[in-house]
Amino acid sequence: MKQTSLAKTRTRTKAVTREATDIGISTGALTVFGTLSTMTGLWAVACFVGALIATGGPFALASAWISAVAG
């Protein structure tokens, strides 16, 4: 006589799909924030270079900054 079991098996396709979606959202957010921070850094460097050119060099920039802060 052969015994058989009537156990139910569950598949977890919903959990896998949600995990894949979460990874996609995390990757997208990381890309957006990485791009924004890179753009902000490049803008800061451009502003610094512009200030160096406008004042005539690093020493002139430092003295102009000190006089602006000191008043």
Image: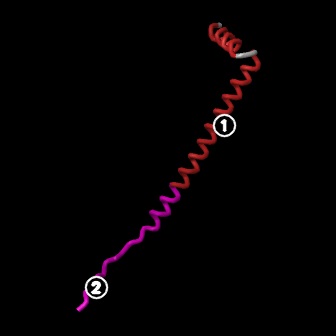
Residue at point 63% right, 11% down?
69
Tell me, yes or no, whether the two marked residues, 1 and 2, touch with CB atoms within 8 Å.
Answer: no
Badge 2: residue crowd in 10 Å (few <14, some 14–19, many ≥20): few
The CA distance from mark 1 to mark 2 is 65 Å
Residue 44's place in the image compared with 4, above or below, is: above
Magenta stretch: includes residue 43: no
Lower position in the chain sequence, tag 1 or tag 2: 2
Name the residue that disc number 2 marks: 4
Magenta stretch: includes residue 17: yes
- Check the picture and name the quadrant holding the N terminus: bottom left
SS category of the residue bearing label 1: helix
Count of numbered circles on the image:
2
Name the residue that disc number 1 marks: 39
Residue 27, image x, y percentages:
56, 51
Kind of residue sitting beneath label 1:
Met
- The magenta-colored residue range is 1-22
Residue at point 55% right, 52% down?
25
Kind of residue sitting beneath label 2:
Thr
- Check the picture and name the quadrant holding the C terminus: top right
Judge left or right: residue 15 versus residue 33: left
Residue at point 67% right, 33% down?
42
Judge left or right: residue 6 versus residue 67: left
